[in-house]
Amino acid sequence: MKICVTGGMGYIGSHTCVELIKNNHVPVIIDNLSNSNKEVLNRIETITGYRPKFYKLDLIKEERLDKIFKKEKFDAVIHFAGLKAVGESVKKPKLYYGNNIGISVILLKVMRRNGVKNIIFSSSATVYGVPTHVPLVETDPIGEATNPYGQTKIEIEKMLMREHEIDPSFNIVLLRYFNPVGAHESGLMGEDPWGIPNNLMPYINQVAVGRRECLTIFGNDYPTHDGTGVRDYIHVVDLALGHVAALKPIQEKQGLKIYNLGTGKGTSVLDLVKAYDEANNIQIKYQIGPRRAGDVAENYADATLAKNELGWEAKFNIVEMCRDSYNWQKKNPNGYNVEPSEK
Ligand code: NAD
Ligand code: UD1
């Protein structure tokens, strides 16, 4: 299939492009590079031998987007584009509503106008709100958003559900990701956050390569097996393959489908640090700090629906996730900001 990949230069989008190419699909990337680097195209080409077509465009620009759709005649869209920093969304809620919801409204309009009625959307476990139980199942209700970023995911999911109600021939897959980590095994692609990382694995990576002194563990008094927060970490390549698998209900015109993409296994912060040390034969320095506002004790997926219906299952374990994360960071200590000599 010829697939429009919005946000395809980003962390999850770039890994998905690689797996799409490997599975004989043709990704065409649209991205404004607001949180990514054009070097990603070279890396995709090095890994796959194919350089995807790339349009540098802010999706808010409806006319130009429409022209691209008229020219390219896409079969489907995978919609990754959006801002994703939870803390920033609390400080700048309008930016998040304007960008994430705004571009999704325009994308849907352009899709409708051009008769493209197939979309996979990057949603998040955050739509469940504060979990009242784990594991989370797709039939659990959408909860109260805990921050503006989460609210945008809820609004976009609801907008897509309404679209399917109005036009049942619109095929929509909502993928609710748990905690994506890891990197391509080549070490050529990985997560490249700007500034101080908010998320656990990028922070550990930067401690590992000496960019940060010490990891602070946010609380060790949660009701979990070792007192630290438990999450469902999933390797980004498994996640990428989840998108390839999600093309099945699109091709079979199954209408509206929702899947959790996680491993179904809970891992604590201390478990992850231990796995990282073991995988990479190093010792991550850490200290225990206070809890982070808005954090929950435990959050992990029931991923059996994706297994039963898509034939998809996460394959990488936590040690492999840590190995690939470190491999990427070690080879690219400053992310994609390649040195002039490497250009
Ligand atoms: P990312 O920031 O690496 O990638 C997003 C891409 O979208 C970036 O390349 C950015 O430049 C682009 N973009 C943003 N606004 C745009 C606009 N207006 N026009 C064109 N391009 C635009 O993020 P990611 O981690 O790859 O996440 C991809 C998607 O998955 C996002 O929608 C995110 O909310 C969702 N998600 C991510 C996580 C996670 O932990 N990484 C978890 C759940 C859901
Ligand atoms: C966070 C967001 C969530 C978002 C997800 C993906 C919050 C409250 N939640 O999820 O909405 O969908 O990222 O972008 O921001 N931790 C430390 N030290 C650190 C960093 C994290 O101990 O320096 C702990 C956290 O307390 C948590 C675990 O590590 O227990 C994972 O944290 P993180 O990677 O930020 O992911 P989430 O909080 O699950």
Image: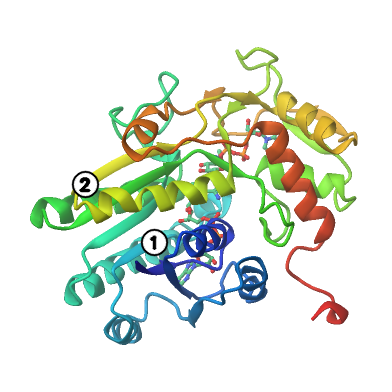
Q: Is residue 23 left or right of residue 258?
A: right
* Residue at screen point 80% across, 61% down: 332
The kind of residue on which mark 2 rests is: Leu
Q: Secondary structure at mark 1?
A: strand
Q: Is residue 323 visible?
A: yes
* Residue at screen point 50% across, 54% down: 89
* Residue at screen point 48% across, 49% down: 241
Q: Is residue 159 visible?
A: no
Q: Is residue 30 left or right of residue 316?
A: left
Viewer-closest of 340 and 216? 340
Crowding around mark 2 (Cα neighbors within 10 Å: few <14, some 14 to 19, many 20+) is: many
The kind of residue on which mark 1 rests is: His
Viewer-closest of 300 and 343? 343
For residue 260, which quarter of the picture? top left
- The vertical placement of 336 against 271, above or below, is below
Residue 319 position within the rendered picture, expressed as x and y whole percent measured from the top left: 72, 33
Viewer-closest of 216 and 70? 70
Disc ID at residue 126: none
For residue 78, which quarter of the picture? bottom left
Residue 138 position within the rendered picture, expressed as x and y whole percent measured from the top left: 32, 32
Residue topped by disc 2: 256
Q: CA distance from mark 1 to mark 2?
A: 15 Å
Q: Secondary structure at mark 2?
A: strand
Residue topped by disc 1: 79
- The vertical placement of 319 against 104, above or below, is above
- The vertical placement of 334 against 315, above or below, is below
Quadrant where the C terminus sits is: bottom right
Q: Is residue 131 left or right of residue 287?
A: left
Crowding around mark 1 (Cα neighbors within 10 Å: few <14, some 14 to 19, many 20+) is: many
Quadrant where the N terminus sits is: bottom left
Nearest to N terminus: mark 1 or mark 2:
1
